[in-house]
Every structure is written in C-alpha cells, then in structure tokens.
Image: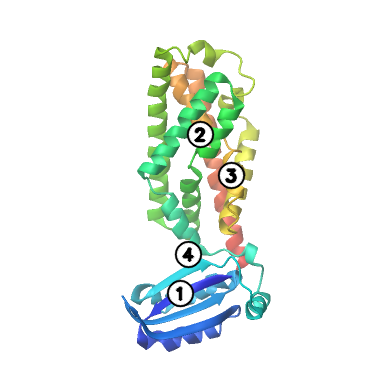
Amino acid sequence: MLHLRLIVPAGRTEDVVRTIGKTVGATHLVVLPGAARDPAGDVVMCDVAREAGDALLGDLRELGLDEAGSIAVENIDLSLSKRADKAEEEAPGEGADAVLWEQLADATHEESTLSVTYLAFLVIATMIAACGVVLDNAILIVGAMAVGPEFGPLAGLCTALVRRAPRLAARSAIALLVGFAAAMALTTGFSIAMDAVGLFGKDMLERARPNTDFIWKPDMFSFVVAVLAGIAGTLSLTSAKSGALVGVAISVTTVPAAANAAVALGYGDIDQMWGSTEQLLLNLVGIVVAGTLTLMAQKVLWG
C-alpha cells in the first residue's frame, strides 16, 4: 500500500476527493479543511494499492495538483485494515508488478546526479578494484563491484530513453562519462604512487592472473551477463525490491574493467588497456539496452 498526503487549494478539493473516490484500490480517505499553511489549502490523505498508485498520481497531476499544491507519497510497511485488504484485492494486477513511473523518475534523477559523493564512491571502488587486479584477488574485485554506484546513472539513462526525457538522459550520460574518466585518471595516479612505494609492479599486472584475467578479455558471455544484470536491476528498481541490486552490482564488470584499464595505462600495457576498455563499454551498452527494453516491456504489459 501507498500513503498519499496532498495539499489542495480549497477550490479544487472536491475534484480531488472525487478522483480518489472513483479510483479502484483507494481507501482511508481523510480531508482536513484549511489545515495547510504553505501552500495554503486543505490537506487530503488516503491510502491506495500500489498497483493503482500510478494511475491515481497521473490523474492528480492532470488536475495540476503538483503545481498548485503538493503530492507526497510514502510506502506503508504495515497496514492492519480490512478496508486496505479489500482495496488491494479490488485493484487490478499485482503490487509487485506495478511501476510507479513518477517514483522511478525521481529516484533515477537523484541517483544520476554528478555529485561529490557519487564521484567519491566511484573513485574508491575503482581503486579497490585496482588492488584486486594487481593482487589477482577475486574478493577485492567483488567488493569493488558492490561499492560502485554506476547503476544509478545507467538506470537514469534507461528511464530517460523510455520517457523521452532529454535532460535526464544528459544528466545520466554526464555522470557516467565524467565519473569514469575521473575515476580512471585518479586510479592511474594511484597505481603509479603504489608502484613508487613498491606495492604495485608491472610484473604483477602482466603475470598469469587466473582470477581476474577475464576483466580484460571480453567475450559474448560478458555481454550476456550485462544484459541479464540490466534486466534484473531494472526489475528491482521498479518493483521496489532493492535487495536485488547488490547481486546486480557484483555481476557486471564495469568498475573492475575501468580499474584494469587505468593500471594498464600507467604501465603502458596497451593490449590490457584496450581489452579492459572494450569490456567496460560492452557492459555499459548491455545494461542500457536491456534496461530500456525491460522498461518498455513493463510499460506495454502494465498498460
């Protein structure tokens, strides 16, 4: 269930109440006349089944409530109510399959912002992966994958393509390009510094690395895994099952590939640098293609 808290200009309250009343899956309607001060108006609250939430939000936006008042949405973790149970039964479809497009757009907009925190996580993840590459340590590679925040901009790009939102697409693309460029540049400097103190060595990079050789040797399996990860990641975002994102993060080779390319660049190993770059691009393209197609399929099927 979702809980909606609305601030409604007094002249539009009846229209809002009528809209909520005709929405199958909505219940627990509360109207507090004159309770809002900024902006001034009435406060209207209700609960709605997740599968009916997107349609109701669309109707409220058509009434101009997002501009003249306010729409706030919260997830209800527990609701002990026969009316709520009945509302969920009456609403068409299953809540786990429902896509809240407004929530998805808002979440991906925030996650795809090129912020200091985003850059810090990406740089740290790439440096951890660099250590894993040189030491041929799979545990460090998995840890770096989990730390990397790159799925946010990738999801933002998928959402922008489906919703035809050029600003979100540009924001996401900038976060990816600038983020990886900065992370790789700083990791190259990091690897040179580690070499200067004797912790890294060119022989460590070029020796046989059975645990991490796959990072700079892309094949069709790399693309297949990226596609599957893109589908799983998109489903986890749209169905609010965020726990699956951890599995998605450690199944793609974006951050490790960027790290391997950076270290190889520092040592002038062109073969590994180009192989790692190809691996990075292959994963990015696979995730974006799969995520976009998944969102398009959800849009069609749910409609």
**Residue 175 visible:** yes
Location of mark 2 (residue): 255
User: Which one is earlier in the sequence, the residue at label 4 or at label 3?
Assistant: 4
Local crowd size for mark 1, using a 10 Å CA cut-off: few (<14), some (14–19), many (≥20): some
Q: In screen coordinates, is 49 left or right of 159?
A: right
User: Is 299 in front, or is 249?
Assistant: 249
Earlier sequence position, callout 4 versus callout 1: 1
Q: Distance between the Cα atoms at labels 2 and 3? A: 14 Å
Model colouring: rainbow
Dividing the image into 4 quarters, which one contains the C terminus?
bottom right
Where residue 43 sits in the image (x, y, percent)?
A: 41, 80
**Which is nearer the N-term, disc 1 or disc 2?**
1
Q: What amino acid is at disc 1? A: Arg
For the residues marked 4 and 2, what is the alpha-carbon distance in whole angstroms?
29 Å
Mark 4 vs mark 1, CA separation in Å: 15 Å
Question: Callout 1: helix, strand or loop?
Answer: strand
Q: Residue at x 40, y 23 (%)?
A: 190
